[in-house]
Image: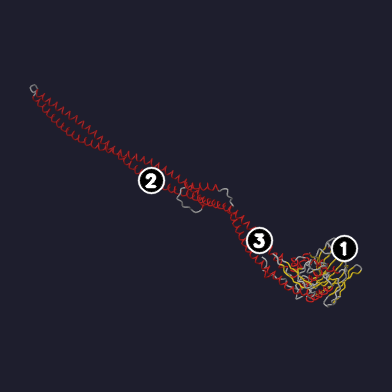
Amino acid sequence: MSKPVEELSVRERTYSPPIKEIILENFMSYEYARIPMKEGLNLVVGPNGAGKSSILLAISVAFGQAYTERSRKLSDLIRRGKDIARVSLIFDNRERKGSRPIPYSKSDTFMLSRYLRRDGSYWYEADYREIDKSEVVRLLREFGINPDNLLIIMHQGMIEELGAISAQQRLTMVEEAVGFREYRERIFRSENDLKSLTSEEGSLVQLIDNANQTIEYWKQVYERFLEKKNLQEHRALLERELLWAQEGKLSKSLRSVREKLAAKQEHLDDLEDQQKRSGTDSESLHKSLLEKQVELGKLYGAVVRAERERSTDEGARRAMERLRDELESLREDIASLKTSVDQKKQKHLQEFLDFSSQKSKRESEEATRKKAELDREVSSLQAELGAVDESIKKVTDEYITQRVKFEVLGYRIKLTESEIRELERSEKEVLGELDALKTDLERVGDRIVTERQPYEVSEEMKLVSAQLQKLQDLPEDAERIYKDYVGNIEGLKDKLKQLQDNRVLMLKELEERKKAWRSAVVGLIEEITPVYQQVLATVGALGAIRLEEGSGIEDTGLQLLVGYKGAPPSVLDPYTQSGGERSVALVAFILSLQSRIISPMRAMDEFDIHMDPKNREAIFKMILAQSRVNQSSQHIVITPSIISVIDKSAHVITVQSVHGASEVREFAGKAG
């Protein structure tokens, strides 16, 4: 942003160094000349063709002018027969108020030279040090000198040009001469800045519109990208959930296997304990069976013995009974034989028979008794044998049952052991699967508690993957692009807001500058108009200076009005007034500005060419009066006319042509 308007002001009048001397060498009609200059009025007089105008032309050339009214080429200004010419201006550089006008020069004088060569080349020197033209322009601008401004340097014949220029050009010249150019330049810069800013604002609005269209597309892409990102995050969560679901399922399987394994182990222990008890019971039953079998064998032996004894006794009893029957039969037979048998022998036989009968009876009875005992014993043994046999059958059944149970338990033990081995294998497999999941579980992070089965999570993952497949064409940097666009458009909007704010400030500042410029110009007109009117009054004329308003500063101009012989003032132009009248009005205008012109020197060549003697004398008196008022400024006035005015303050220089070369003489304190 430019400085605030209140900081802008007309360049303060500081001491600017006057020209102390002009040195011409092989320049036009001069072979070598040193022309002294003073502060105040320097009046250069001499006949036409003597070389007066060459002095002002030399000053302009030294100031950097490339075009002259007498020549199109600088090489044409070199004296005939010479190859190089030099123009040097020596400035007074003495300290004033503690500083030198040209601070980088430590000398009381400062010499600016320009060399011209026949081949068209030229260069500048400052105190014998070659410098660039830009340094010359900068130095002159610093002192408010523009050799192309007619109000500062008016060459021969240019009074008409000053009258022919437009009001706008005239105002521009005045602004530059009095130091108001800064106002105009800053207004133009502000207007250019404003145009540039407005153009930039328009471009920015268009850019924002285009960006909005683009961002709408990328917004849709970004929304799809967010959907894709959410799906990816959801899939990642599902992958995590799937892993933990698998881990949960495996852990649950492991717990189930271990519970089954513990139950099977407990069942195996119980089966083994049952088998052990069954084996013990079986062995006990087997031993008891063996004992019963031994007992049964003994009983069988006892029964056989008793049966044998009973059978023997039964045979004996029967034999005794047959014997007793035979004895009885024999007794009967013997009784039938009583007559024929000796009685004594019959008696002995009878006795023997009785004895034998008694004995057989006893033996038969004994056999019967013994048989009864044996019957009882056999019956008892048979009962006992039946009981033992029944007991053996029972023990055998129990033994068989226990052996079957033992074998069944053995089979169940083997089956359980097989189941345990299968469960142990399953446990190992589950542990292996859990170990394989360990790395992935560590990668996915903290446990996710889920009640879902892995296949349920997997099915959802398939759906998410299918949705992601539809979004696979999205660029991976969609988020960055969209956010860049958002950031850029926000930046553009901020910049647009700043531009709009700056435009408002700039418009305000521009208006303030225009007001300041107009106020300064109007103030200047109000200040110089009385002087302008005073000068015109010396020749019996009326005049006014008027600001011609335009649509902008570039259209605003300065109008000079003048009226002669009682006529009301009218606009100065080539058609209304005569040449002399225009010259008088223009010189009056120039004289009115003298107190405000910031250049340390100002010059006019043949300003009076169209004036009659009366007007010339009146105007010249005003020139003398103005030079006395502005003693700190340096005025150079060139005229071929004879001036019948004497003033000790004027520094008079005469120029004459002697044998084809111009020569200069100095007269102080008079003019004639």
- Frontmost of labels 1 and 3 is 3
Mark 1–mark 2 distance (CA, rounded to whole Å) = 134 Å
Q: Which mark is residue 105?
A: none
Place of residue 445 in the rendered image (x, y in percent of width and height, measured from the top left) = 51, 53
Mark 2–mark 3 distance (CA, rounded to whole Å) = 96 Å
Identify the residue under disc 2. 267
Q: Going by the picture, which residue comes out furthest to the top?
A: 340
Determine the residue positioned at 62% across, 60% down: 496
Question: Is 396 displayed left or right of 256 in the figure?
Answer: left
Identify the residue under disc 3. 198
Amino acid at pointer 2:
His
- Badge 2 density bin: few <14, some 14–19, many ≥20, Cα 10 Å: some
Identify the residue under disc 1. 83
In the rendered structure, which disc, 1 or 3, sits on the residue that comes first in sequence? 1
Place of residue 159 in the rendered image (x, y in percent of width and height, measured from the top left) = 80, 68
Question: Is 420 displayed left or right of 107 in the figure?
Answer: left
Image quarter of residue 599: bottom right
Image quarter of residue 113: bottom right
Figure coloring: secondary structure
Amino acid at pointer 3:
Thr
